[in-house]
Image (cartoon, grey):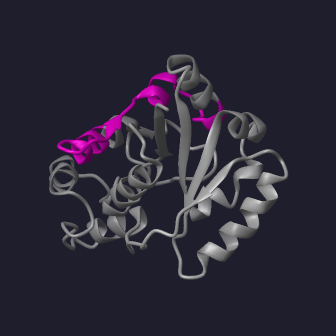
Amino acid sequence: MNRIAIFGGTFNPIHNGHLHIAQQFQKQLRAQRVLFIPTFVPPHKRAPDLAPAEDRLEMCRLACEGTPFEVSDLEIRRGGPSYTAETLLALKREYPDAELCFLTGEDMFLTLETWYKPDVIYSLATICAAPRSTDGLEKLRAYAEKLARHGAKVILQNIDYLPVSSTMVREAVRQNRAIDALVPAEVARYIRENGLYH
């Protein structure tokens, strides 16, 4: 079965934790492809310090160079709020025979019912989530049972959590601290050279 893992998010910026989750899920799902899809406008969270879409896309491309991962500008080309339901519909049209797996972190997973057209998401993709806290797995399990009653297929993976977040990276940049341990070297260079997050 051709299996495609889709990793959506603001990637503001992409960091080593994102790449770690993608690697672990690619192994567990035996996915033939992993697509990183940066949002144009995140519909679920206010993002006052959001870098321009072109910069976030380029940082994703730099982070994925030399890896088996790919980057798609689908949501950026579409413009407007980046609804996962619309993205999955577009991918299903493009890859009608593929099984789609949608990767998400703990915080986003726990809000899935409030997303735009959640039933469309459940019908098109298996939802894959990983905890981002020590007690996260229990919360994910309880929520997964709730979603299953609405027809969602869920895979939970207890991945070793890398304590890195985009907020940490932006904060470090603002405080002129090194970010080389948090993001790939090319991403760190891009942030420096383009004066992002100051």
Occupied quadrant, residue 198:
bottom left
Give the residue displayed 35% in from the left and 60% down from the top: 20
Q: Position of residue 44 (x, y in %)?
A: 64, 49
Up/down of 107 relative to 66, above or below: below
Occupied quadrant, residue 18:
bottom left
Q: Is residue 31 magenta?
A: no
Q: Residue furthest front?
A: 1
Left or right: 92, with 194 as reference point: right
As rendered, which of 69 and 51 lies closer to the eye? Answer: 69
As rendered, which of 99 and 104 lies closer to the eye? Answer: 99
Left or right: 43, with 32 as reference point: right
Q: Position of residue 126 (x, y in %)?
A: 62, 44
Give the residue displayed 40% in from the left and 49% down from the top: 26
Left or right: 23, with 130 as reference point: left
Q: Residue furthest bottom?
A: 134
As rendered, which of 76 and 84 lies closer to the eye? Answer: 84
Left or right: 148, with 72 as reference point: right
Give the residue displayed 67% in from the left and 76% down from the top: 138
As rendered, which of 131 and 151 lies closer to the eye? Answer: 151
Up/down of 150 relative to 171, above or below: above
Q: Position of residue 40 (x, y in %)?
A: 49, 35
Q: How many marks?
A: 0
| Highlighted magenta segment, given as a residue range | 58-85
Give the residue displayed 72% in from the left and 45% down from the top: 115
Up/down of 160 relative to 117, above or below: below
